[in-house]
Image (cartoon, grey):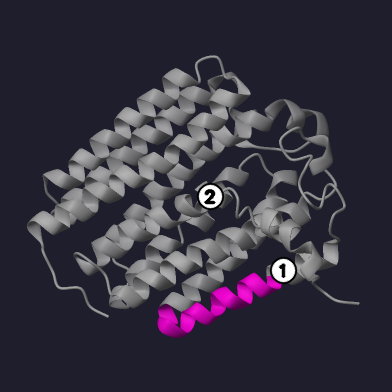
Amino acid sequence: MKLLSKDHLPAYLRLMRVDRSVGTYLVAWPALWSLWLAADGIPPLTLLAVFLVGAFLMRSAGCVINDYADRNIDQHVERTKNRPLALNEINAGEVLTLFALLCALAACLLLFTNTRTAALAVLAAVITTLYPFMKRHTHLPQLVLGMAFSCAVPMAFAAVNDNVPYVAWLLYTAVVLWVISYDTFYAMVDRDDDLKIGVKSTAILFGRHDRTLIALFQILFIALMIAVGLIAQRHIGYFVGLLAAGILFIYQQISTSHRSRDACFGAFLNNNYVGMVIFIGIASDYALFNPLTVTE
């Protein structure tokens, strides 16, 4: 019996969420911020390619293992009931094979980095694998997801400079807070279904204080990002990017005032623009004040 079937390729692509790229962007933006900060400008093009491809592969792998973990509950949740495994379009063995293949491809990218980066990548892979199973044991799976997504930060610094300075861990903490905030919006979409089937999340833990606590995490994120900018001796472009991010956070709070599913999902998606404006701020700041030659 074949482990993977070409006839099931459309289902595999849906399993990987290739048709929903926002998740890849949310992994990639902190990696891009970190590469520019670590390189003090435009990073080596090889590393840029490694981290962009790696963001796609590991986000895809995370989606695959998530659907494996949720294979017995997705059919009971409105948002997930049409996923390939929930519809029995593919079997669990195919899912695990695809997950292993994606991880193997991501591991090949480490040949272009160094030992420190590889060690951090292994840690990221372990946390990514554990994340979907946390929903049964803790109300803080969003924290675990944040820890996984944020691993791109120290990895980028390690890849560029073979060390992870204090500012990298400050940025790591900021990204964890950002992930918790936007993934709580995401969890708010499923809250009613999750309560029925016993799945845990920060949306359930926070209850009626959800938007208030999300706002707190967003404020702390901006505060830590300001600290990162000051330590990195950045200029106006960087801080204009943070101002734009703050405006987007205000929009998210206003748009979710009634907590409708569509509004909460929209607020989650809007965080792609948060990542984008911060990156534009960082890149433009370096282009204006630290112009460097691109290296291979």
The foreground one among 281 and 175 is 281
Q: Which mark is residue 98?
A: 1
Q: Mark 2 points at which residue?
A: 23
Q: Residue furthest front?
A: 7
Q: In this view, does 198 lie to the left or right of 227?
A: right
The foreground one among 25 and 37 is 25
- Near mark 1 (Cα within 10 A), the count class, few <14, some 14-19 or many ≥20, is many
What residue is at 50 percent from the left and 55 percent from the top? 149
Q: Give the residue type at disc 2.
A: Gly
What residue is at 46 percent from the left and 52 percent from the top? 25
The span shown in magenta is 100-116
Q: What element carries label 2?
A: helix
Q: In which quarter of the image is the N terminus?
A: bottom right
Q: In this view, does 190 lie above or below 22?
A: above
> For the residues marked 1 and 2, what is the alpha-carbon distance in whole angstroms?
18 Å
Lower sequence index among marks 1 and 2: 2
Q: Quadrant of the C terminus?
A: bottom left
What residue is at 75 percent from the left and 57 percent from the top? 11
